Amino acid sequence: MPIRILEPQVVARIAAGEVVERPASVVKELVENSLDAGSSQIAVEVSGGGVGLIRVTDNGAGIPAAELELAFQRYATSKISGLDDLESISSLGFRGEALPSIAAVSQVEIVTWAASDPTGNYLNLKEGVTVEQRSQGRAQGTTITVKNLLRNVPARLKFLKSPTTENGHIANVVSQYALAYPEVKFTLSSEGRAVLRTPGGGKVIDSISEIYGLEIAREMLELGQGENDWQGGPAPPSVRVSGMVSAPTVSRANRDYLSFFVNRRWINSRLLSWAVEEAYHGLLMTGRHPVAVVNISIPASEVDVNIHPTKTEVKFQNERLIFSAVQKAVRQALIAQAPVPGIEEVATVYGVKTQPRPSFWSPPETGYHPVSSSHQAGSYHHTGSSPLAQPTPSLSLPALRLLGQLAGSYIIAEGPEGLYLIDQHAAHERILFEQIERQSQRRLVEVQGMLEPATFEVTPQQDASLKACYLDLPEFGFSLEPFGERSYLVRAVPLLLHKKDWGAALRELLDALADGDAADWREKLMISFACHGAIKAGQALTDDEMREMLRQLEKAATPNSCPHGRPTMIRLSSAQLEKEFQRT
Ligand code: ADP
Ligand code: MG
């Protein structure tokens, strides 16, 4: 075949293929046009997964009658006029390709009125060719109706997914623009049902709560609140990062909840996803991803948006600058506003975060008695030369030296008064009980935010108890809110019950409350939480874990019994041993 120039129709079809990948691409282009026209209201209506019908109605500037047919010519645009303009594009469109591309693969009807014209106008095109044009009244703005999309491109049509999937892509496009333009009132109806409606009041949080729901919206943190105290110097004045990101209490299993807008253009960017996720380093479990709406404003000359027909990818002049601006803005929001400790910060000794322990000589905490000074906490120097010379103080324990573990359940230790057999579960219960008491008194209970709120169902009886006390539970690290009938959403749990059966601990408390007097509910709560937080009998412990347990038990105010009143330890005095061995 000799070389020749392709027929315009063929060219149009090829070009259309680049812009119109699927129905959602059409929605994207039409919504972008509506935004460029300065609309404050944009309504999108689709059916048949967008193949049957796509209709976008706006109240923007409209297209003057004299330009209406021209708008459907290739490379016809009102948004740029020369080469210089390409260097600093401030509109979403600029290539003049969308309308002709869409028209080439569908049937298009447009009704538009620009204020400069006496009346509105109607234009009907089939496969890019005008079949009818006349005047028609309408309010200022534009309505474009696209039917039978890609029907004349079977190869492309074949690759479309189910209408449900295509509708999902369309909903995503409209959602993204609703996030980027909270001042615009968006509506989307799909197969006759209202899917999305944003108020258009200008607050991104309203769009977030409409799109992702109230629960996520509640956990969002604002970006760009304090650029000036960034470490490593002030933010470069040319880059401004705004938007919202989720607190580490919220996370998602994929990256679908990351939205990036550069000068209000929705873009995909691995670089920016990476920058955001870097900022969460150590705050989210691997495989979990945050929710983010990140707006980047930079001088138009700093970014090239003309690298792909769909304009969903951009090239930054200075990638590192953008990366670090985004990463710092997100990190700063997390540090300044997120209330919960990161997963990495959670020490694993007994599954409990160990407080920086007060030094031995520091003033005693409330309800907390130091051991007597002859018993140096942390190290045991006693040689055994005068084992009976120091009577054990009635409450506090002497320093103990670890000998080992027995039957996976008892710690064997030596003290100035002989041999100690310690029930590891009971002892740990005692330690935790006092820790909870101390922390709640000082309002320092350590909490672990949930990655996703958990639902907690209760019986009608438990419900009555829980209704009475759930507002007081944050004092002990639980944050719960009613969620439907006899159901609660749990957003945070005490750190000591994290990874434990906190539901069982709560239910046990509720049952205990239902049985008896609610006046001492705090005591009952501490008992239940300590019991469920404590290590179990039968669990092998390392020497370090056992030593740590002994150190903590030495500091307990009432080390000898567990909160239920059972003994935590049995002592065999040196005198008893001598007697048993008939040494005396
Ligand atoms: P581009 O957006 O790249 O300019 P399009 O093919 O999408 O190219 O649109 C061509 C032109 O039609 C636009 O430049 C604009 O002048 C006009 N236009 C398209 N849609 C609208 C609309 N909803 N409101 C007002 N003008 C519009
Ligand atoms: Mg356009």
Image (cartoon, rainbow, N blue to C red):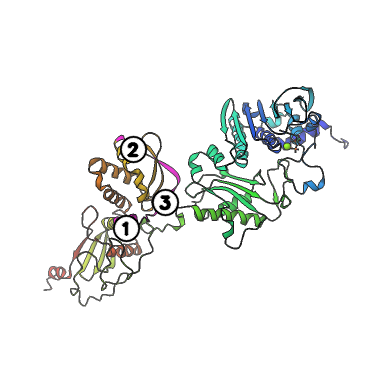
Q: What amino acid does circle 3 point to?
A: Gln
Residue 438: numbered disc: 1
Would you say the residues marked 2 and 1 are in contact, meaning their CB atoms lie under 8 Å apart? no
Which of the 4 image quarters holds residue 435? bottom left
Pointer 3 residue: 448
Viewer-proximal residue, 489 or 420?
A: 489
Residue 458: numbered disc: 2
Q: What amino acid does circle 1 point to?
A: Arg
Q: Is residue 433 above or below residue 116?
A: below
| Within-10-Å neighbours for mark 3: few <14, some 14–19, many 20+ | many
Q: What amino acid does circle 2 point to?
A: Val
First reached walking from the N terminus: tag 2 or tag 3:
3
Q: Secondary structure at mark 3?
A: strand
Which residues are the magenta region? 432-460
- The location of residue 454, given as percent across then percent down, is 42, 42
- The outermost residue toward the bottom is 385
Q: Is residue 161 above or below residue 226?
A: above
